[in-house]
Amino acid sequence: MVNKVIMPKLGQTMEEGVIERWIKKEGDKVEKGDILLEITTDKATLEVESYAKGVLRKILAQEGETVPVTQVIALIAELDEELPEIGEAIPSGVKVEVEVEDGKKEPVGVTLEKGEPVAVVSKTGESLPEKGRPVAEGRVKASPLARKLAQEKGIDLTQVVGTGPGGRITKEDILKKVQATHPVGRRSHPFRDTPKLKVKSEEEKKVVPLSPMRKAIAEAMSASKKTVPHYYVTIEVDMTGAVIRRKEILAQMKGKGGVPVSYSHILTMAVALALKDFPEVMSSWDEKGITVNEKINIGIAIALDEGLIVPVLRKADEMTLKEIASRTESLVSRAKEMKLKADEYVGATFTVSNLGMFGVENFLPIINQPQSAILGVGAISERPAVVKGKVAIRHLMKLTLSVDHRVVDGQVAAQFLARVKEMLENGEW
């Protein structure tokens, strides 16, 4: 039996993935559970296991290619089994006849299955590119810049030969097509010369293509700002007692191993316990009603070179401080290596974003839908403060809660922040 390997859908927002690396090669034997390849999604780099046993007979999507979810990327079968003609690459120089009916081109003599990738073919009599470009039905592989440039110049992408990885159309391919289709010549004006404008050439500009992660961040944050009525509540916390107690904890841990407790770990525990008193802050808006989440799953915002990722600390209210420290550091290290599992960055009911380590005093984070709040954490800094009628130097920190006004009223938000402040200042963690 021929088994199709598809691009898996790992998460509700995933629409496509990038083939990072094939671990198994064509001709390799495959057992159930073997790792076939690594893919990069908008969240992480993940390993894809085989659900079939046999031989990896055909790889249909090469390393570096961006593939829509559910598209077939490989075939697993026995050595003597006949493979279906799915997205077969057409050798260089071969000419394929094309029948045209109602404006739709169909290659002659190629078996196609609806919704599966087909080979891009040329018009009758034209030589094909060195490799046929397997694409989903109605989809042409092109970089975001190439698509934008093609739209501006009125170029039909289906008429462009891609020279990028896996036949991907690049900016240079579009520019060559423009030059071939519309030769540029200078037009003289009968009365005056056309003014010369100094324009920065395309070659001097650096354009960074959108990664799946950056694209997902842009879409999610734009949607949140457009649809969620944000408001912000800020409170100042005296962390002097927490600073002293943390030093004591670190001294007790010295030589015993374990992850050193940080202020982020302390804050996470205080937030988790405060959420037990104010579960409304974890509610989610829906046109049908407001859903109050029962599980305290705290998302920890982590900055990567590619963008922001938010792994989830599940049931944080049931953990000890040492367990929070250990689990958080495991998530952070694997997030930076892009090795998180699919279920480790979904399901957060509240998010904590800490920029204090960069010296940021205060900021207004954007809510991660469908959550209704996110806590922005500023730096702990020594500043003068009035304590019992006297001025003293204290360790102060600002917390800002971004809140969805459709779900959480100002009074509840203020009470929640006050509870977090109380727990941090009184050492209730």
Image (cartoon, grey):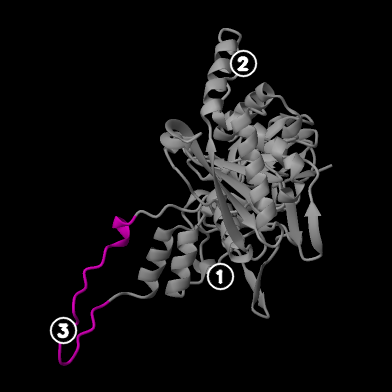
| Residue at image coords 72%, 35% | 273
> Which badge, 2 or 1, is on the more N-terminal residue?
1
Range shown magenta: 185-205
Residue 271 visible within the image: yes
Judge left or right: residue 334 versus residue 142. Answer: right
Quadrant in which residue 58 is drawn: top right
User: Whole-Å distance between the Cαs marked 1 and 3?
Assistant: 42 Å
Q: Which residue is mark 2?
A: 258
Residue located farthest toward the left when viewing the structure as drawn: 192
* Residue 161: image location, x then y, percent: 49, 61
Q: Which residue is mark 3?
A: 193
Circle 3: element type = loop
Residue 114 drawn above or below residue 83: below
Tag shown at residue 61 = none
Residue located farthest toward the bottom when viewing the structure as drawn: 191
Q: Are marks 2 and 3 in contact (CB under 8 Å)?
A: no
Q: Amino acid at mark 2?
A: Gly
Q: Which residue is mark 1?
A: 123
Predominant secondary structure, magenta span? loop
> Which badge, 1 or 3, is on the more N-terminal residue?
1
* Residue 215: image location, x then y, percent: 55, 54
Quadrant in which residue 202 is drawn: bottom left
Residue 252 drawn above or below residue 10: above
Residue 371 visible within the image: no
* Residue 181: image location, x then y, percent: 39, 74
**Near-viewer residue (26 or 322):** 322
| Residue at image coords 45%, 57% | 170
